[in-house]
Image (cartoon, rainbow, N blue to C red):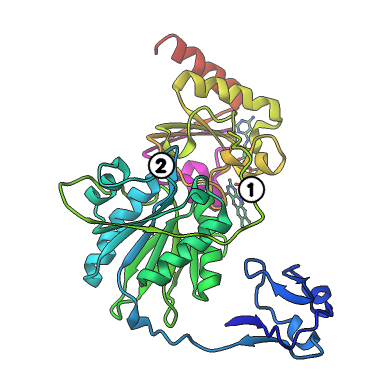
Amino acid sequence: MSIKVITESCNGCGDCVSVCPYEAIMVEKEKAQIDLDKCTLCGACVPECPLGAIVIKKGISKEKPSDYFGVMIFGETIDNGVHKVVYELLSKGRELADKLKVELSVSFIGDDIFPPDNKMVDGVIKRGADKVYILRNKAFKEFLVEPYTDALVYLIEEYKPEIVLAGATSEGRSLLPRVAARLETGLTADCTGLDINEDGLLVQTRPAFGGNIMAKIICEHKRPQMATVRYKVMEEALEKERNGDVIIDEFEPKPHKTRFLKKKIDQTQKVNLEDADIIVSGGRGLQDPKNFSLLQELANLLGAALGSSRPPVDDDWIPYSHQVGQTGKTVRPKIYIACGISGSIQHLAGMSSSDYIIAINKDPDAPIFNIADLGIVGDLFEVVPELMKRIKNGK
Ligand SMILES: Cc1cc2nc3c(=O)[nH]c(=O)nc-3n(C[C@H](O)[C@H](O)[C@H](O)COP(=O)(O)OP(=O)(O)OC[C@H]3O[C@@H](n4cnc5c(N)ncnc54)[C@H](O)[C@@H]3O)c2cc1C
């Protein structure tokens, strides 16, 4: 579907502006203008226009699914390097592309990515990409969702991949829905599994209904099939000597209102949660925000990152960036120490793939003990200080 103002018919009365629930319409130079980033195509404005100047076109685009080929990965970058989620997507993307017998590509959007001696480009080719698309413009220096949406839409319309994947990171989660809406195609967010079925369609698996079922979703009629994939649920692709093509393109995004001012780093997280080998996590059993300092002390001793279940985040005891679980981060550390966490299905969804799980809980029936490799039944305010004493004594 698409929406359009027939400018010759519009007299700028503004009736549509007042009914739009998404504040997506403004009147400029006596003509209504629709901000497509905000418009959800709900259609509230259409009957309101006395001149019939707003139309929603229904129907399928002229392009058929068979016009699309290949798997494209959004090349998310972080601190001037490739985000590791891209390496995970490359291992899965390679598998999907091989099943479909098509090419795998990575698209980088940025202002200063220079092949062929660029490590990022070389790295993704060695990990499985056949092609690397680079879209350059100074507007892409920092991630801003509006110009990046323009850029990714341009790349998809130009190169027509049948599948587009991105990490379910903050960037991927904000970018892909906008791109999918612009392209009028489907998107499955937060996938934990991807495969190709006998009809050559992408089967996108993700937890649904609070993690009680694993839904398998397909996008049959629209292209591309789009998915964001959770970080740390798939293995990273390994480097091999191989070659690939690099295609550099220039693109001018349209002017947008949002400007980049500065990046604010979460100073409370000394070790990145998703990359940590050890995580010490606290739950509602900590009883008070100040008790996170006890867990921080244990984390510092172990060189660990500090995690949390959702209630302490909801109660503002600790920032959201620490939350582990279905609506937080997925982690896979070597050791996960859960302190005062009951082990709800939503929490387990984010940490059950940890190599070794240690649970400290005063309730012997707490569900966390069902998945723990080592369970300590006791009061965390006694167990944690004792643990620290023993670590300090080298035991
Ligand atoms: C759609 C949805 C998404 C969600 N997403 C997430 C998510 O991403 N992550 C998440 O964690 N939750 C999530 N939740 C919430 C989830 O359902 C649980 O409510 C939450 O995980 C419980 O957190 P908790 O274990 O810290 O608290 P509780 O379940 O209240 O458990 C506290 C535990 O601490 C123990 N305890 C108390 N005092 C002590 C002590 N002194 N020493 C030792 N143990 C003690 C208790 O025995 C108890 O087992 C989500 C819920 C929904 C509906």
Nearest to N terminus: mark 1 or mark 2: 1
Percent x, y of residue 205: 42, 65
**Which residue does the numbered mark 2 point to in the structure image?**
332
- Quarter the N terminus occupies: bottom right
Identify whether 274 is placed above or below 384.
below
Quadrant assignment, res 135:
bottom left
Beta carbon at label 1 within 8 Å of ligand 1: no
Question: Is residue 370 on the magenta stretch?
Answer: yes
Q: Which residue is mark 1?
A: 259
Residue 10: quadrant of the picture: bottom right
Locate residue 226 relative to residue 143 in the image: left or right.
left
Disc 1 to disc 2, how far (Cα)? 35 Å
Which residue type does callout 2 highlight? Answer: Arg
Q: Is 108 above or below relative to 84? A: below
For the residue carrying disc 2, how many other residues have a C-alpha within 10 Å: few (<14), some (14-19), or many (20+)?
many
Residue 310 is tagged as none
